[in-house]
Amino acid sequence: MLSFVAGFAVLSAVLGASSPESAVPDVFRNIELQQVIDLTAAYTRESLKVVAMNIGEEPVREYFLPLTYEDASKLAALEAEDDVGSLRINEVDSLHDGSNAYFSVNLRQPVAPGEEIEFTVGRAFIAKTQPYPRKAEQSEQQLLVYNGSRTILSPYKSQKQTLTIKTVTQNIYDVEKDNRQTAKSQQLGGLATFGPFNNVKPFTRTPLTLQYENPLPQVHFPRLDRKIWISHWGDAISFDESYDLQNVGTELKGSFSRLDYMRTSDGRAFSLNTAAVRQLMLSVPSPARDMYYVDLVGNVSTSRVQTSAEGTRLEIHPRYPVVGGWHYNFTVGWTNPLGQFVHKVGPNRYTAAIPLLTGPEDASYDEVSTKIILPEGATNIDFADVYGNSAEVSTVYSYLDFQGRPALDVVHRKLVTDHRAGLLLVSYDYSLLAALRKPLILATAVFCVFVTAFYGSQINWSL
Amino acid sequence: MDVFTSLVNAHKNAPPRMKLIDIFMVFLVLSGVVQFIFCLLVGNFPFNAFLGGFSATVGQFVLLAALRTQVNPENKEEFRKVSPERAFCDFVFGSLVLHFIVYHFIN
Amino acid sequence: MDVQNAQKLLRIAILVLVAGAAVLSRLYSVVNFESIIHEFDPWFNFRATRYLSSHGFDSFLNWFDNRTWYPLGRVTGGTLYPGLMVTSNVVHTMLSKIGIPLDIRNVCVLFAPAFSGLTAYMAYLFGCELKDETAGLLAAIFLGMAPGYTSRSVAGSYDNEAIAITLLMTTFYFWIKALKLGSVSWAAACALSYFYMVSAWGGYVFITNIIPLHVFVLLLMGRFHSRVYVAYCTWYALGTLASMQIPFVGFLPIRSSEHMSALGVFGLLQLVAFADYVRAKVLERQFRLFVVSFVVIVVAIAFAALLGLTWLGVIAPWTGRFYSLWDTEYARIHIPIIASVSEHQPTAWPSFFNDLSFLIWLFPVGIYICIQELRDEHVFLVVYAVLGSYFAGVMVRLMLTLTPIVCVAGGLSISSLLDVYNQWNVPVSKAPAVETNAKVSKKAAKAKEPADAAPEPKEVQGFFASFKSANITSSISKVVVLVTFFGYLAMFVSHSNFVTQSSYSSPSVVLASNMPDGSQFLIDDFREAYYWLRMNTPEDAKVMSWWDYGYQIGGMADRTTLVDNNTWNNTHIATVGKAMACDEETAYPILRQHDVDYILVVFGGLLGFSGDDINKFLWMVRIAEGIWPEEVSEGRYFARGQYRVDSEATETMKNSLMYKMSYYRFPEVNNGADRVRGQRLSPSDAPTLNIVDEAFTSQNWLVRIYKVKDLDNLGRQVPAAAAFDRAH
């Protein structure tokens, strides 16, 4: 409490002296900031290592990180950790000013004045890179553009900053400086370093526009609909996932020649043919059975299941190679035993821990809507996820249902493959009576039919 | 002409049920003829209305003829499975179906 | 449990097993491939069913489809037979109401096998009416399994025949029942089932003609009695009126020649009934004079009126589809579209055996037995047999209408055989008629009666009864005959199963072949291309293809097509044919005129798929030639009398759009070897395309989609502009 008042005093004192964007107390000095931006995947991953020293007079517990509004709107994942474990990091709405959004890292212990702390912040962004040129012929390369800043945006003064960018190939072109970092080649393992920049003032941004080649397909799912059916009678939890796939890489201009595609599919030369989505690897929680891969016109036979010690992987091939700008749509489903995800936590009370995402590797998602369908007669339902979302409860009528099954609907936006570790928790009551209700009703109905038929056959219907 | 008088005599000697049915059948024939002449004079638009009405008379005539033969005590040998009550019930059923369809047809 | 109940239980068990066998033998394609709609026509039925279930019955009847036959559109609600779609929709709704939410696609796929079980039951009832339960059971198993029927009712074959044969048997059963009992309610039921049949299939004309023909033959045989009058007139009045409720049929029953025989027999029956009534009331001499003067004059006037109206055009003459059954050369000359369908070709004799197995030689035996017994219902069988045999010989597709009568006749013959040889407790006694009468008294209140207890003159024993009184005392002969026929029956089942599995269970949307190591290799190119169209083209894109694929494009790719399998507009099809057959300069204005965005062609040269568009190309040329004989001429596509596609092809052939689209860049693949035509294209033959761009080709080059180029920015002719671009 006291630190807040102190911070506020410092804030108001400092307000006039520094640049307009300094509602953040200037209590840290960055000894070193190392940022590594990974552009090899279908989405952007940034890892920022912070070594900072408390230059204020009071112990401080919070470290602030800004992001431009544009970057914040594309932010998919955010986490922080130090060498002991993970730290809490969240968005601070009260500090938002005209151009930046602020995030605060809660340090494990308050940092005494003069002490240094070290931690890492990991971020993932969707759609931070765009193809440029937007359209290209089938034989041309897929070139993407990354817009960012050479210097790392920080509210504190930095003594040393370095920026490293990793790409798939060594074909990188720095637009502002108009130079190619390395020879224009298609060798793998591209690396571009910027800096070290010394004594960087707070909130400095130096524009960086990098055009680089990424020969890998940019898999993006604008929409994913998941349905998860929990059945106690069948001892099964069934997943049904419907994906809308779009290749957000360079769009194909002109004709698609199957011949050229067949010829260059060996991957020796990089072109839009190699940037086409030919297969997706989905990791399915094992043991899984009854797997299917269908789309709107029927079964797709080009799939393979690989079981190994690490788990089951479902390798699916779209019907046609999804070249840049093309869409595809498919549905996969499988069934796991109930005990893998649902645990009994009390008399008649169960908790289901359902994975947030089980998609293919290296993909990003715009909107994921999950529907968890509980058995008929489940009551007293609780829902929790990491983001604090609440779920809407609706009713779904399915096989031989009388009152319908409760279903929880929840929507997540901007997810990436790293979210596969996330969980959704659902707790519900399901008593034995509720379980037996459906068979009893069915038995009664069939009994009534037989009794009616018996008495009906005793009556003389002739005229 | 002898044929005609024989027929009229036969009608006079028939049981009351038969007479009723006969008169109804004659009425239907007249009604059908009138509808046809109307159609010729005034034109046949809408055609389905004319057809509906005309078929109603034809259909009802046929059903009545069927009822008549089934109820006629002289034909008992031939209709062993169909009692007169059953015949009437069938007649009602057939008429219901006929008029339902005609009602749909006339629109 | 006494014998009667045991027999009843056994019969029920047998019928359930027959229905089960009928259903299971049709499921091979679902097991081998997946639950998918087959062929071409079922895709339209499926699309219509989906429309019905999502939009409701009213919008369905008034549906104007603007996504087919662009830019004409099609009044679909008024030009289809709604029975099939309405039935599926009702089944789907009822199932979801009782808590089994089946997907509409699964309902449609499994519709035909489900109804085949019902057909078997109806055949059982029909056989019972003709002879007895044994004949019924045998007819049921024969019809349930015969390949002639399964060929059009496997799972996935969602076509009108799936429900039509069930309704055919139902209508015939009700007709025979009405005739035997002389009851109006059975005749009304026959009329209602006839109405259902009219709503389901265009082949209802067969029933419309066979029942009057049956009555006419009975009249000629002198077998007029009141029951005939009651049954036929009720059926005609109610049935014809009901059939006019279907929008597609409309006023045809009084306007077209195909329905005139029913009307004629109706009128004739009124006259004969009147004459019969009068005869009972007046003296013999007066009667004869009366008949000659009155009846003959009326008949002559009516016939003259009929001819006059037909000559005036008020009554339409026989339509091409049915006229070509009479004059088989008519279609080839005048309506090439009908002639080009492979199902309309005459039947080759091996297919009789393939589709009917050993029933084909039991069929004449059964008809002979009918002729000997010759009650009213057996006359019907004889008439049906004659008509069915003629039609089955004319068109392969009509094997389907022959199958029920063959099965019933086969059932009759084998049950007669069993009557003679399957009597094990026979002392050499007389009066088997006493036993049958005893059976009658026990089954007093049942709806179905044994056929031999029907009204028959008491003094004549009847042909069927003579079987029961034949005494074969030697056990060895009984055993030999029974074992032999048991073997035949077993062979029938295994043959039917084999034929259904191997020939008739292919979805034809998915092709299967074998890889060198024996594993199955699925060729899914059609769905790949259709799905590409569905996902990667604008919603309102117009696709031009040959009419074969129209329904599939509409059903799977969900795009607007120019022509499809309905083939109702010959000129529109000829326009598409002309665009495919002419060179690019002539084709481009046609494409622009019809707003075509994409063109789809099927090319089997790389795979060896012989049903591709280059093989159908001559039909395109012929149909176009029918409308524009001065622009398109078939002879110009033949090089020295041969159909060549390599360097020896004629200039017209090489410049045609279809040739260019099929072989675009093909010489670079597989050395240009066309595996279907067996010819090789060298790189110098490689065609160049000026007015279209290649948009997509499927994995095995089976389906090729091209995008039509837009108008040139500088106002040049597009082919010239493309040639200019290529040169620079």
Image (cartoon, grey):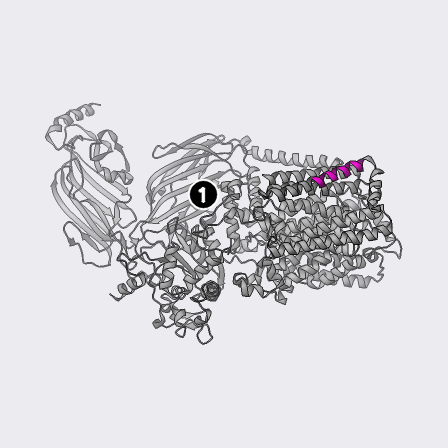
Can residue C609 be seen here? The reply is: no
Query: Which of C377 and A351 lies nearest the eye of the viewer?
Result: C377
Can residue C148 be seen here? The reply is: yes
Residue type at mark 1 is Phe
- Count up the numbered dots: 1
Query: Which of C515 and C587 lies nearest the eye of the viewer?
Result: C587
Q: Chain of mark 1?
A: A
Question: Which residue shows up at 36% across the image and 39% down it?
Answer: A422
Query: Which of C463 and B47 lies nearest the eye of the viewer?
Result: B47
Asked if residue C143 lies left or right of residue A306, the reply is: right
- Above or below, A409 relative to C644: above
Question: What percent of the width, then of the height, locates residue B45?
Answer: 57, 43
* Quadrant assignment for the C terminus of chain B: top right
Q: Quadrant of residue C467?
A: bottom right
Prevalent SS, magenta region: helix
Question: What percent of the width, then of the height, locates residue C354?
Answer: 63, 63
Element assignment for label 1: strand
Question: What percent of the width, then of the height, locates residue C474?
Answer: 84, 62
Asked if residue A130 lies left or right of residue C82, the reply is: left
Q: Quadrant of residue C182?
A: top right
Query: Which of C369 and C359 lies nearest the eye of the viewer?
Result: C369
Q: Which residue is mark 1?
A: A239
Is residue C217 located in the magenta-colored stretch of the structure? no
- Above or below, C325 relative to A12: below
- The region drawn magenta spans B17-30
Q: Quadrant of residue A92?
A: top left
Crowding near the residue tagged with mark 1, few <14, some 14–19, many ≥20 C-alpha atoms within 10 Å: many
Question: What percent of the width, then of the height, locates residue C347?
Answer: 61, 65
- Which residue reaches farthest bottom? C640
Is residue B23 located in the magenta-colored stretch of the structure? yes
